Amino acid sequence: MIESGLEKIKRILKKPKDINSVNLYFFLKSSKVLKRIDLIDNSLQSLTHNVCEDSLKIFKDSQNIVNISSFENTKNAIFKYDLDYTDKLASFLDLIRNISRYEEDFFDIKDDDFKDVGFYIFKFGSEKENFYSVRKSYAINVYGNDKRFIIFPDSNRFRKIDKNLFNVDTKVDFFMIDDELYFINLKILESYFGFDAIIKENAKKSMDKIKKLDILVEDASLRKRIEEGDLTFSRKLSKINVNSPVFEVKKREIIEFSKTNDFLKGEFDYDEEDKILLSTKKSQDLFVKLLNDNFVKSELTKANYDAEGKEIKRDDK
């Protein structure tokens, strides 16, 4: 059985003694380069221990592995990236792939600025394998001396710190191993890596496939929601493009199903050619569910299910 990238990470983390090197890098937003952090040995050991513990907790709490292309509102999930890279994400990953170039390029307190840190990256190395954990840096990570009076105990007195401080927390936004990406925090994909553009593009490809089915009176209402930035709706359209088997079904069968299924009957209007008219957001959402093949029937209980929402409608006939 082939071991997945995520399984490799879990295996390595469960045996921290086999990790023979850990390095921390900062990604600087202004120059778009990496700077290695020169850590004192005992600080590095403590930090490594905390990162390993927090990462293992992610695997314990996250019971589902979901492809981003088929994303639904799945709780406690880890998302495997299986779409095209945005330009920003591709450039960032190239830096990580070539991280060895920055081994001797250290973050300099005099020349570099904590406020310029966009991400921090841990590189874990065992004898044969490397993987990376990546965390977004936020303004809250920097404790600035410009607007705050930061003090700490010095014997029995307090004194002011005249330099900025940086807080490295040990949470993880995504892992990278063998060119596989596993996201825990999807928000950074949208806020930093331009993921919404990929979602919109794939949603538009889905619309092109839907048009070929020739079962809608018009598709402008669906395209409008994509352009208006409805990402939840666009994600579901993207899933159609990648996964749906409905496009193999005959047009007449799809129309008949839309009229007789317990979840769908009465929800759509039809023109004189028996094409579907999507006049409300509810009907649009149901149509996307239809093409995602969400409506299934249990062979055991004879109940009709909405596979996405787990809603049940029983056939009492």
Image: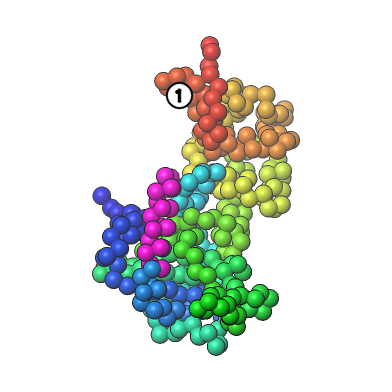
In depth, the one of 117 and 192 nearer the eye is 117
Q: Is residue 209 visible?
A: no
- The coloring applied to the image is rainbow
Which residue sits at x=43%, y=45%?
Answer: 64
Q: Is residue 195 above or below residue 291?
A: below
In depth, the one of 269 and 27 nearer the eye is 27
Q: Which residue is mark 1?
A: 298
Residue 32 falls inside the magenta stretch? no
Dividing the picture into quarters, in which one does residue 17 lie? bottom left
The percent coordinates of residue 171 (x first, y second) are 48, 60
The percent coordinates of residue 256 (x first, y second) are 59, 25
The span picked out in magenta is 47-67
Which residue sits at x=29%, y=71%?
Answer: 20
In depth, the one of 217 and 102 nearer the eye is 102
Label 1: which secondary element? loop
Please give the count of numbered marks on the rendered protein.
1
Which residue sits at x=44%, y=84%?
Answer: 105
The percent coordinates of residue 260 (x first, y second) are 59, 22
Residue type at mark 1: give it.
Answer: Ser
**Residue at the limit of the structure toward the front, as seen here:** 156
The percent coordinates of residue 140 (x first, y second) are 60, 67
In depth, the one of 135 and 177 nearer the eye is 135
**Residue at the limit of the structure toward the top, as seen here:** 317
In the image: residue 83, left or right of residue 15: right
Dividing the picture into quarters, in which one does residue 285 lie? top right
Examine the residues drawn in magenta and state their main secondary structure.
helix
In the image: residue 280, left or right of residue 214: right
